[in-house]
């Protein structure tokens, strides 16, 4: 398989709750192939549970060989990292405060190393890219090191090879803001590859979750009886996959417009179906 990025992320169907029966809104975790913008699989979290229990079930449905799996801090778990490696994949996991001092230890190390002279620091790979538009300039710098023998938790994370810092600087007029985020990975010290994986992860928000709300009005759906909310979520994923796959045949037509065209005319609908079957 060609190496790609599979982003794992969850979304709550906000109006799928049923107050009369005491049922909370369901939460669906999806595996999104960022390169081709397709939902590969989905798993509903159990009642009174969270994504940590759903992600392992979701991963079992996937062929991860040669793929990079990205997950936000909620899914940064040792067992999940082990499962990804056992399924022949690589991982890039975001860090926060849910793994003891791991995030803080890595933050202190990388922020210290990056201030040293190049010949003295432990930074092995750096990649930087910039974007300008809508009155702002964004610069992203990825800093990676595999010099992590000092890290106490290294042995507890399967195939942990590198740690990374993404530094994002945004300039809007005279205002400049900087944010730093930290990651662990089974990838070798290749800053460009890790930066690509981190950035690709956010397409699950823009190309999946945002699209489901804007195009399919998912958050306002009041379907809530029995398994209907989960089933309708799967149907919307199928429909979105079909629209994404057929979009290349319709120049300058967005997903929302393409869905409307399919409803207005059988010719468009036939083209979409032909591209998928």
Image: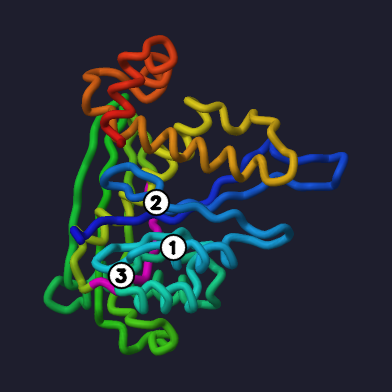
Magenta-colored span: 178-187
Q: Answer yes or no: do the residues labelled 1 and 2 have beta carbons within 8 Å?
A: yes
Q: Residues within 10 Å of mark 2 (few under 14, many from 20)?
A: some
Precedes in sequence: disc 2 or disc 3: 2
Q: Position of residue 229 (x, y in %)?
A: 65, 41
Q: Answer yes or no: do the residues labelled 2 and 3 have beta carbons within 8 Å?
A: no
- Residue to which mark 2 is pinned: 40
Give the main secondary structure of the magenta stretch. strand
Q: Name the one closer to the observer, 17 or 61.
A: 61
- Residue to which mark 1 is pinned: 61
Query: Which quarter shows the N terminus?
Result: bottom left
**223 part of magenta stretch:** no
Q: CA distance from mark 2 to mark 3?
A: 17 Å
Asked which secondary structure carries label 1, the reply is: loop
Residue 230, placed above or below residue 159:
above
Residue 51 picture quarter: bottom right
- Residue to which mark 3 is pinned: 90
Q: Residue at x 20, y 71 (%)?
A: 189
Q: CA distance from mark 1 to mark 3?
A: 16 Å
Residue 122, placed above or below residue 41:
below
Q: Residues within 10 Å of mark 1 (few under 14, many from 20)?
A: few
Q: Is residue 112 visible in this depiction of the protein?
A: no
Precedes in sequence: disc 1 or disc 2: 2
Asked which secondary structure carries label 3, the reply is: strand
Query: Which quarter shows the C terminus?
Result: top left
Q: Position of residue 215 (x, y in %)?
A: 47, 25
Q: CA distance from mark 1 to mark 2?
A: 9 Å
Residue 66 picture quarter: bottom left
Asked which secondary structure carries label 2, the reply is: strand
Q: Residues within 10 Å of mark 3 (few under 14, many from 20)?
A: many
């Amino acid at each position: 398989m060609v190496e790609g990025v599979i982003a794992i992320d969850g979304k709550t169907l906000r109006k799928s709750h049923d107050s009369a029966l005491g049922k909370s809104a369901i939460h669906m975790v999806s595996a999104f192939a960022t390169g081709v913008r397709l939902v590969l699989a989905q798993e509903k979290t159990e009642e009174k549970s969270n994504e940590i229990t759903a992600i392992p079930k979701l991963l079992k449905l996937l062929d991860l060989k040669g793929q990079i799996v990205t997950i936000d801090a909620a899914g940064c778990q040792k067992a999940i990292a082990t499962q990804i490696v056992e399924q022949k994949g690589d991982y890039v996991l975001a860090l926060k405060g849910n793994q003891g001092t791991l995030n803080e230890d890595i933050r202190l190390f990388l922020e210290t190393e990056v201030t040293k002279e190049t010949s003295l620091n432990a930074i092995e790979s750096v990649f930087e890219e910039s974007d300008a538009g809508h009155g702002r300039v964004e610069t992203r710098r990825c800093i990676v090191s595999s010099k992590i023998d000092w890290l106490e938790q290294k042995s507890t994370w399967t195939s942990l090879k590198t740690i990374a810092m993404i530094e994002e600087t945004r300039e809007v007029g005279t205002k400049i803001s900087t944010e730093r985020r930290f990651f662990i990975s089974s990838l070798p010290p290749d800053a460009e590859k890790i930066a690509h994986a981190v950035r690709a992860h956010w397409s699950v928000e823009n190309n999946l979750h945002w699209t489901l709300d804007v195009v399919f009005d998912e958050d306002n759906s009041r379907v809530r009886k029995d398994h209907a909310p989960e089933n309708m979520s799967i149907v919307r994923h199928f429909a979105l996959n079909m629209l994404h796959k057929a979009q290349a045949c319709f120049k300058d037509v967005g997903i929302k417009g393409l869905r409307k065209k399919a409803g207005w005319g059988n010719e468009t609908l036939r083209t979409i179906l032909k591209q998928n079957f």
